Amino acid sequence: MPNQNLQEFLLGHLNELRKQGLYNEIDVVKSPNGPIIELEGKKLINLSSNNYLGLATDERLKEAAIEAIREWGVGAGAVRTINGTLSVHIQLEDRIAEFKGTEAAIAYQSGFNCNMAAISAVLDQHDAILSDELNHASIIDGCRLSKARIIRVKHSDMIDLRRKAQEAKESHQFNKIMVITDGVFSMDGDMAKLPEIIEIAEKYDLITYVDDAHGSGVLGAGAGTVKHFGLQDKVDFQIGTLSKAIGVVGGYVAGKKELIDWLKVRSRPFLFSTAISPADAAAATKAIELLMKNKELNERLWANSDYFKKGLKDLGFDIGMSETPITPCVIGDENKTQQFSKRLYEEGVYAKAIVFPTVPKGTGRVRNMPTAAHTQALLDQAIAIYAKVGKELGII
Ligand SMILES: *Cc1c(COP(=O)(O)O)cnc(C)c1O
């Protein structure tokens, strides 16, 4: 017999969500996650992946993964600190450090895990964290796990950050204070104001932590938001993911040698969760090598996203304040946003609606992620569908 309390809890909440239209039915994709995807027997232009550079389906990465499986098998066999550290992991970490311009790097099983790992490895209840209110869920959870005092900062509001940093510092309540931010904010596509954040950090002696999941492979000719601003020597923690532009799965922290040495002995996902598979490590290494050698994919990503953004803007859509390929198309009303996304789907474009509580009430949007793998013809087709649906629903 299932526990009755649990069943009541689950049924009650599931019914409530369904009644409010907030229960997310998971779409099952029947094809690789490329520029065109297949769902329900239908082919759609895919504008919802994080596969910025098209590397998730790149033949060179596939070959690297297959070769690694032949040589190493499918699993690492242990956690990194026992005997799950294979030479493929060290190669990956060496490449990441080179790519990021840091002394060292450590790989984790996901970007999410990096934030579970790194924050609580250095902070505890005697410390404080200044955290942008729009930081990613994994940052929020990582901060909570550390037990440090969390001080929410208004989104990219440097006056608020400066004031709260000063207050925290001058209260003499905390041993250490960290400022933590996304490099690129995933719902709006805006960049963190890193030069000002660093200046405030220097003034108030803050540890600096940038989670650049959406900046890596995208900004700074691929090396990320920190490189974009030339601040590699000023950021203590550079977090990245291997799951978005890199196209595989995993995450990493790049920084000083002492930091990485410490994370290797104290960060719990490194100690207590099995290492990423040899195939993932080899494919991610290949991706980083490609990006370091060749800027072409990165340039194509930007050319495509500039083209697509201009297309939507010229039609009269509100594309918010994005500074990166992330292209929100802000509709506003939640129901209308859902309806818009549904009509796009029927016409052949897969672009997910993102509504409250993921974004503030009244700012519902359809989020588009053009990639290096889209052709101009596909983007033209998508823009034409946007025009049709936008007019039909009275949005443009
Ligand atoms: C996507 C994302 C993550 C999670 O990365 P995964 O590798 O998919 O676990 C972490 N942080 C930020 C800021 C992200 O955007």
Image (tube, rainbow, N blue to C red):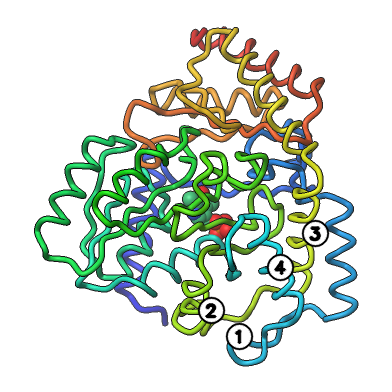
The residue singled out by tag 3 in the image is 286
> Helix or strand or loop: what does disc 4 sit on?
helix
Q: Nearer the viewer, residue 72 or 26?
A: 72
CA distance separating discs 3 and 4: 9 Å
Q: Are marks 4 and 2 in contact (CB under 8 Å)?
A: no
Residue 64 lies, with reference to residue 204, above or below; the image says below
- Residue at image point 36% right, 62% down: 141
CA distance separating discs 3 and 2: 22 Å
CA distance separating discs 4 and 2: 15 Å
> Helix or strand or loop: what does disc 1 sit on?
loop
Q: Nearer the viewer, residue 376 or 160?
A: 160
The residue singled out by tag 1 in the image is 79
Q: Amino acid at mark 2?
A: Phe
The residue singled out by tag 2 in the image is 270
Q: Determine the residue located farthest toward the left in the rendered image.
A: 171
CB at disc 1 and ligand 1 closer than 8 Å: no
First-in-chain label (3 vs 4): 4
Q: Are marks 2 and 1 in contact (CB under 8 Å)?
A: yes
Residue 326: give x, y in percent of width and height. 57, 33
Q: Nearer the viewer, residue 270 or 47?
A: 270
Residue 363: give x, y in percent of width and height. 38, 27
Residue 229 lies, with reference to residue 98, above or below; the image says above
